[in-house]
Image (cartoon, grey):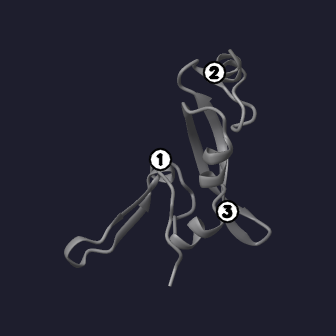
Amino acid sequence: MAKPVNCRYFYGDYHRGKNVEECRLLARNADLGRSWKRKLCDACPIPELIIASQCRHLELEAEIQRKFLRDQVVVTFAICTRHMIELDDPRYCPLCAQENSR
């Protein structure tokens, strides 16, 4: 049995026998190239990245890439929606850090 997914982008509908699961982060990317599978959630870096980030207005884009003979979820773009700046490191927004230090 797969472990539960604690991610704001994971969607699961099991009502009345349905078994619909999807990653809404990867579904936003129109040109996936590779299809999403539930197994990708077990090694996905997104939930830990969101927890570790000091930016509470973080929005991400990701894609599935083939690395070391395995499919992996890789963050391709990160932005702080409060300050509308692109982040080099999704864990750190310099303007949010300034606001939090005051």
Residue 67: % across, % down: 76, 64
Q: Earlier in the sequence, mark 1 or mark 3?
A: 1
Residue 64: % across, % down: 62, 58
Numbered disc 3: secondary structure:
strand
Q: Earlier in the sequence, mark 2 or mark 1?
A: 1
Numbered disc 2: secondary structure:
strand
> In the drawing, does residue 73 fall left or right of residue 69?
left
Q: Which of the two residues, 53 or 35, is positioned nearer the viewer here?
A: 53
| Tag 2 and tag 1, C-beta contact below 8 Å | no
- Give the answer, above or below, for where 13 lies relative to 100: below
Please give the residue where the numbered disc 1 appears in the rendered image.
30
Q: Residue at x 68, y 14 (%)?
A: 102
Q: Residues within 10 Å of mark 1 (few under 14, many from 20)?
A: few
Mark 3: amino acid? Gln
Please give the residue where the numbered disc 2 appears in the rendered image.
85
Mark 1: amino acid? Ala
Mark 2: amino acid? Ile
Please give the residue where the numbered disc 3 appears in the rendered image.
72
Q: Distance of mark 3 from mark 2, alpha carbons? A: 26 Å
Nearer mark to the viewer, of 3 and 2: 2
Q: Residues within 10 Å of mark 3 (few under 14, many from 20)?
A: some
- Give the answer, above or below, for where 86 lies relative to 31: above
Q: Which of the two residues, 33 or 101, is positioned nearer the viewer here?
A: 101
Residue 93: % across, % down: 69, 27
